[in-house]
Amino acid sequence: MIGMGLNREAEIMSRDASPRTIYLKDYRPPSYLIDQVDLLFTLRERETRVHSRFRVRLNPAGEGGPLVLDGEGLRTFGVWVDGKELAPDAYQLTDTSLTLPNPDNRFILETEVELAPETNTALEGLYRSNGMFCTQCEAEGFRKITWFIDRPDVMAAFTVRIEADKTQYPVLLSNGNPMDAGDLPDGRHFAVWDDPFPKPCYLFALVAGDLDHVEGYHTTPSGRSVRLRIYTEAENIDRCDHALRSLQKAMTWDEEHYGRECDLDVYNIVAVNDFNMGAMENKGLNIFNAKFVLANPESATDADYLAVEAVIAHEYFHNWTGNRITCRDWFQLSLKEGFTVFRDQAFSADMGAREAKRIEDVRLLRSHQFAEDAGPMAHPVRPDSYMEINNFYTVTVYEKGAEVVRMQANLLGPELFRKATDLYFDRHDGHAVTTDDFVQCMADASGRDLTQFKHWYDYAGTPELRVTSEYDETAGRYSLRFRQQTPDSPGQTGKPPFHIPVAVSLLGKYGAGLLPEGTRMLELTEREQAFVFEGIGQRPVPSLLRGFSAPVKIKYDYSDEELMFLMAKDSDGFNRWDAAQALAQRLILRMVADRREGVGMSVDDGFIKAFRIALIDRSSAPSLLAEILTLPSESYLGDQMAEVDVDGLFLARETLRERIGGVLREELLAVLDANLEEESYQFTPEGVGTRRLKNLALSYLMARGSRLALDLCLDQYGARSNMTDVMAALSLLADTNVSEREEALADFYDWWQDDPLVLDKWFAVQATSRREDTLQQVKRLTGHRAFSIKNPNKVRALIGAFCSGNPVRFHAADGSGYQFLADRVLELDRLNPQVAARMLRLMSRWRRYDEGRRGLMQGQLERVLRTDGLSKDVFEIASKSLEGA
């Protein structure tokens, strides 16, 4: 950690000292356990003192030996055992460990250390953000606060006393319930918090600051009243109501769907500006990136509202799936994250537009997780090794992990799945367990053998299903034959067949289902498997993988006409969208191929006809129509090519957008007119869908480049009716070369220059502009007074948005985008290695590109890897990306 000279060497690695790899197979139970933790924090900006008192005992399941405590950046002032201070030669102290060679079986251990929160730019452990103290301890941040056995299978009850200046830090918060508070000499005060539920140290939290709050209450089914508070700076207090309502809805939903009540008297959420992640589920004191708390119609878009609701729910649901039951070791991270993502996805679907939510989740999975599974960073849902655990907070662990839970729910059905989760909570409450334990509960509750299903946790890669069909008209018999294959991934070849649930329906001429049950769940367990359907009186169109029942790639030789039929007639909203995506993908990739052959790019009339039919559809929800009418992204399309054609994809997709905007001008204008809102902003599923469809129509009109479209866009921006419409218009203007573009950007900045969260949108909209000068503008903005390389939100909004959300400019043929990213990664690595490593991932799939771009990306990765003093976070990403090069 930066700020304490003795430990900087523990956080960085030279090229000649590669980080150590940690393996799942080497897991051993801890030699010692800690039952009770008492902490005293004497908070000061530059020199905070932490006095720790632990009740330690020998673990009968452990191997005994010395007691080894983890620590980083700790200036140690003393060590005591059973009240007696130890001489320096009675223990061993290094930059990263404190060892007691021969401790008793039971004893009280005390330590006193000093930290420097003011200079902690890594934002792990205890640090300062916008004038307040706060913590982030997952995964291994607690060792930067005090000496401890920093692993999730050591669970203890915590009592915390915080002392600080009363004027600067009137609010003092920690986990659990408030026990005591009072004044101290010299203008200081204290607060005592007690959390009676044993927890791993990564769930410890502390906040001290000058904060205001909104307050509410929730009454549980058992009659307990829980006080709820959302804390933030006073100037933002009017933007917390949505977060409070979201928390109350999440608590009710968890009671109704899983029978889980809140177990504390108070539940607090704090919004902070400097945070590496989205939020943290610390027991009773959730610390949130302010982005996922603050929202009102003037400053937040529909996407922001949805994200606040989902993330608030996610962190609350962790109280049972993560806190009361936690993971035995960090290889089991998906035990808590996969299950909790599954739960928050179900909650969001119940709160909003169910079909649109499922599409959103699958789009993220396909565009990011499938890509991760196909690249050098591929790893199983339960990894078998890591160098730096922070690098494994990935879409595989979270989103694919959620899909693995969803498949178990699909296989068991609602009643048995609820029975299995009840068993899981009852059997493992208060314990640190594994994904195997979770699956065993599914098996025990259902009576099913799920041994083969565990392959989903053990193997990386996305299974591919090739499907063929046969129809015997005379016998009325239809058959589907499946063949599954999972590609090789780093360290894993020759993978066995998976247990895959595939939901199917057979559709007749007018879209009616031909199966008596509507949808049938097929279970694939063999490499090749056939399923026969009797009594089918006409050749059907198969609707495969309905609702995306498994995270697989499915290949069936649909004709264009069959895709158009599914796009219009399928009763499964997800498969309507999927058919539209497949049709657009087929057309765009053909246009790219034509360009390569020197043939002009043409747009198929059949596609335009299908698009027109969808545009004039008034029977479907606007949210679903907006998804159906959205073209696949360039990044996703690139993943469908053997070698990504950056320029070809950009030109083909833009040509298609322009054609849609021209040929379907009147239909698009009609959609705009039909979805204009006369009332004030309402965050409802209907309102979100209406705005999404309206702004999509405007984007197609703007792609054509007419004066009428520009005037409509300027009018929408100028109306300032809500941030969703303002940002939709501003993002479209940012792509243009008209003079009004600069006027709008300047106006927006003047309007919101004192709001850091809204300014993130201003940075991002410029970073994702498709103009040729975008990289120059991004470089200029890194020097803007509102930008700080030390703030993760700003880094993601400007640098991350450009490198991940603007493929045609980031992948410029001259390699300037790659050099820019490598420069920023090296700059970040000395401040915040965790954020730096996440940025570097954007070049990890360099082998997918043409020879020129491959060489340029490889060169920048090698340059990063050659750099002295590289963190293990960045070292792991760079070295794995280059493996075998």
Image (spheres, rainbow, N blue to C red):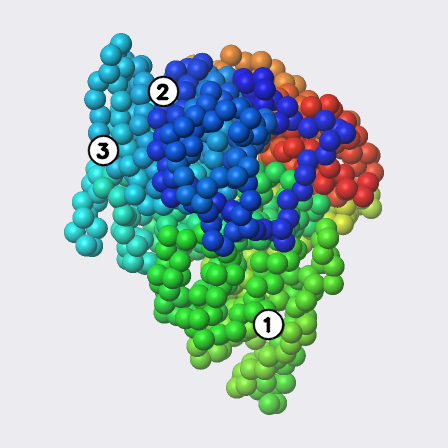
Identify which residue, 72 or 734, lies in the foreground.
72
Q: Which residue is mark 3?
A: 179
- Going by the image, does 644 lie left or right of 256? right
In the rendered image, the residue lying farthest to the bottom is 475
The amino acid beneath tag 1 is Leu
Q: CA distance from mark 3 to mark 2?
A: 18 Å
**Mark positioned earlier in the residue sequence (3 or 2):** 2
Mark 1, other Cα within 10 Å: few <14 / some 14–19 / many ≥20: many
Residue beneath label 2, please? 42
Q: Earlier in the sequence, mark 3 or mark 1?
A: 3
Q: CA distance from mark 1 to mark 2?
A: 59 Å
> Mark 3 or mark 1, which is nearer to you?
3
Q: Is residue 338 visible?
A: no
Secondary-structure class at tag 1: strand
What crowding class fits label 3: few (fewer than 14 Cα within 10 Å), some (14-19), or many (20 or more)? few
Whether pointer 3 and pointer 1 mark residues with C-beta atoms closer than 8 Å, the reply is: no
Precedes in sequence: disc 1 or disc 2? 2
In what quadrant of the picture does the N terminus appear? top right
Quarter residue 210 falls in: top left
Name the one closer to the observer, 343 or 18. Answer: 18
Q: Is residue 803 above or below residue 644?
A: above
Q: Quadrant of residue 154?
A: top left
Choose between 219 and 523: the one closer to the eye.
219
Real-space CA distance between mark 3 and mark 1, rounded to the nearest whole angstrom? 55 Å
Residue hosting label 1? 524
Asked which secondary structure carries label 3, the reply is strand
Which residue is at 32% across, 45% downward? 197
Q: Amino acid at mark 3?
A: Met
